[in-house]
Amino acid sequence: MVMPPAILSARGVRKAYAGKVVLDGIDLDVQQGEAVTIIGASGSGKTTFLRCLNWLERPDAGTIRIDTQVMGRTGSVVATERVLAAQRRLFGFVFQRFNLFPHLTALQNVALGPRRVLGQGREQAEALAERELRRVQLGEHMHKRPSQLSGGQQQRVAIARALAMEPRVILFDEPTSALDPELVQEVLDTMRTLASEGMTMLVVTHEMRFARHVADRVVFMADGVIAEQGTPEALFGAPADPRLQRFLRHLEPSA
Amino acid sequence: MIFDWNVVWYAMPLLAHGVVMTLQVSVVAGVLGLAIGLVAGLASLSSFRVLRGVVRGYVDFIRGTPLLIQIFLVFFALPVVGVRLPEYWAGVVALAVNSGAYISEIVRGSVGSVEKGQAEAALSIGMTRSGVLWWVLLPQAWRPMVPPLTNDLITLTKNSSLLSAISVYELTRAGQAIIATHFAPFEIYLLLALYYYLLISVLSWASRRLERSLPQW
């Protein structure tokens, strides 16, 4: 089978902090419409990799291609701040701790990007924001501030905020790790819906049920590299890498 | 010793004129200082190294030298290079430039204290650094700025008494003039202290009102 060109492609991504290597050369391709989960023990570099993709952290080496653009480059020269900002917009990013803007209502949180980045008028931006909030089942809460919403609702607002910018890919950084257990499901349901609608997603998660049942592909990271990847059936059914076998054994009770 | 009530009754209305001048100097210098501080504070947050260095030098100079010397520099030294300001404006400029340095540090600190994830979230929806500052960080920084800003405006108001040294006829200078003619330092300085105290109390009260009226989330 001939694969179409990947919508997102990382090559040789490296990152070190104070001499400690966190990412040791990562290659990954993500196809349009694919839902990929990244699993792995704490400290394996999953989150850093995600943050390097949209250049929240600048990779030390390697290239990241999103759609037709190479992150941080304009042709063969270093991109200006303005160009980099526009490239970053091709990614949505959902944070573990939501990072909603506390001084704005849910509606304003979602409308801020369309207004101030895309330059839409207020009415247009708020109409768009309302649509996105309804899409994550939060239509009736749109005039509340983040502090008036539950963690699960806040995370869904954050997802709507990312969606409003019409990203090519949405990156999720442990989106349910900061939530009380009873609030996890509503966020996972939202993500499952997005995946079924064909949204391209890259999800760092500890939710093995999500990795098993929603993801098209599972990537296992260890020691700053991709140690193994494949379909959920292959990875969970017949893990080859000993580090993955150990990782899955420790998870067994909850998975 | 005998407390001379007569000189107190005599001085009170005269000093009221001084209060008006002190208030006027403080308000004008305060507004200018806020403007300088805001601009310098934002400059110190910019990505231009040279701009940051200039602000750094300015703040260092102001912090490292006495206000009285700064006032003398503006009033006595600037004319040498051709900038001649009347007492009033020399005083206002010196106070504004002085408080502007401290206020720029408040602006920088308040913006810097906004949680790091806020800037990341704003970057992640495609904002440039200046957009992040303007639409996300500054709106959250106003409220924490108010208490330290009030402190600085109170300090500025008290510092305005130093302008008596260049003959600005503000509260302290007005008191000194009465002392010179009536030889009642005990009564008059006590009265001056009381006037300043009342002035500052009103400022503190207004600041608490302002802080409470700012939106909370």
Image (cartoon, coloured by chain):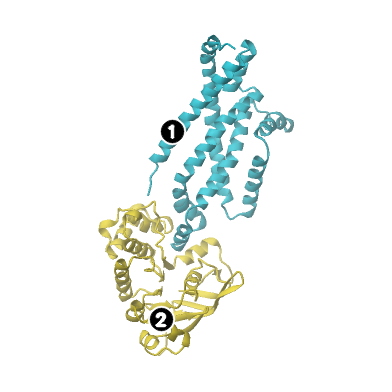
Chain colours: A yellow, B cyan
Residue A36 horizontal/vertical position (percent): 40, 78
Amino acid type of the residue tagged 1 in the rendering: Ala
Label 2: few (<14), some (14–19) or many (≥20) C-alpha neighbours in 10 Å: few
Give the spatial CA distance, label 1 vs label 2: 60 Å
| Chain to which mark 1 belongs | B
Q: Quadrant of the N terminus of chain A?
A: bottom left
Number of callouts: 2
Any part of residue A110 in sight: yes
Label 1: few (<14), some (14–19) or many (≥20) C-alpha neighbours in 10 Å: few
Q: Give the farthest residue toward the front.
A: B1
Q: Label 1, on which residue?
A: B206
Q: Label 2, on which residue?
A: A250
Which of the labelled discs sits on residue A93, or is there none?
none
Q: Is mark 1 on a helix, strand or loop?
A: helix
Q: Who's the residue at 51% across and 18% down the image?
A: B16
Q: In which quarter of the image is the C terminus of chain A?
A: bottom left
Q: Is B180 or B43 nearer to us in this picture?
A: B180
Say left or right for A85 vs A200. Answer: right
Amino acid type of the residue tagged 2 in the rendering: His
Residue A20 horizontal/vertical position (percent): 59, 73
Q: In which quarter of the image is residue B30?
A: top right
Camera-near label (1 vs 2) is 2
Residue B46 horizontal/vertical position (percent): 57, 53
Say left or right for B117 vs B61. Answer: left
Cβ–Cβ under 8 Å for marks 1 and 2: no
| Chain to which mark 2 belongs | A
Residue A140 horizontal/vertical position (percent): 25, 57
Q: Is mark 2 on a helix, strand or loop?
A: helix
With respect to residue A156, does B70 lie above or below? Answer: above
Q: Who's the residue at 61% across and 72% down the image?
A: A19
